[in-house]
Image (cartoon, rainbow, N blue to C red):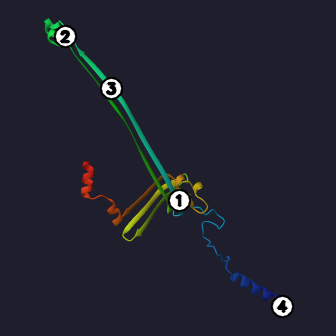
Amino acid sequence: MKQRNLPLCLVALATLLSSLPASVQADGIYPVDKKRSMFADRRASAVGDIVTVIITESTTAVQSADVDMKRSGEADAKGGSGLWGLMKLVPRASLGGSTAQKGSGSTTRNSRLVTSITCRVAEVTSTGQLVLRGDRKVKINDDLQTLRFSGIARFEDVAQDNTLSSNVVADAQIEVFGKGPTERSAKPGVLGRIFEFLF
C-alpha cells in the first residue's frame, strides 16, 4: 500500500517546488542598493558629501621703511674779459646749498579667526580633489552674520570623522560679513566720510 502512494508523494513534492519563486533573498538591515558597505571608508569622496572645515587662521603683517637722503650743491660765477669785455660787468658770486631728509615708519597688523563650518562637496576634479563650498548664517535679533567658505582639498587630508583643517585647503576663500543695526552703527556717517576724504 505504501509503495503505491510513493509516486503520488513525489508528484506532490515536485508540484510544490515548482510553485516556489526562482530566487529567494533574505531581508537585511542594510539596503541592497547601498553604494558603500558597512566596512567601506566613510570619508567624504563624492558630490554631496559633508565635510566640517576647522578654520584656524592667523596672520601678522609687519612693514617698515627708513629714509635717509642728503643732497648738496655749489655754483660759482666769476667775471672775465670775454665777449668784448661784457663779462667784466658780471660780479663775482658763489651759491651753495644742501638738503637732508630722514625719516622712518612702520605698520603692524594682526588678525585671527577661529571657527568651523560644515561644507558640501560641490565637485570632484579629474585628479580626485574635492571642491568644497559652504555658507553659514547666524541671525541674532536684527543682525545677520554670514560666514562663507570655498576651497579645494585632497581626499587624503580628510580625517575619519570627516573634519578638515583650513590650513591644508588650496585656494581657500573665507569671508565674514554682517548686516544689521550693529554693522550700520559701526560705519561713519556721510559727514564723517566727507571729513575723512578731505583730511
Query: Which residue is pictured at 60% across the width and 69% down the height?
Result: 34
Q: In this view, does 174 lie above or below 72?
A: below
Instruction: Say whether residue 81 is left or right of residue 132.
Output: left
Q: Mark 2 points at which residue?
A: 79
In three-dimensional space, the C-alpha distance between marks 3 and 2, rounded to whole angstroms, equals 28 Å
Q: Name the residue under label 1.
A: 54
Q: Name the residue under label 3.
A: 71
Categorize mark 3 by other alpha carbons within 10 Å: few (<14), some (14-19), many (20+).
few
Residue 145 is tagged as: none
Q: Which amino acid, by three-letter code, is at mark 1?
A: Ile
Q: Nearer the viewer, residue 97 or 178?
A: 97
Q: Name the residue under label 4.
A: 4
Labels 3 & 4 near each other (Cβ < 8 A): no
Query: Which residue is pictured at 32% across the width and 59% down the height?
Result: 187
Residue 140: % across, % down: 40, 70
| Mark 3 or 1, nearer chain start | 1
Categorize mark 1 by other alpha carbons within 10 Å: few (<14), some (14-19), many (20+).
some
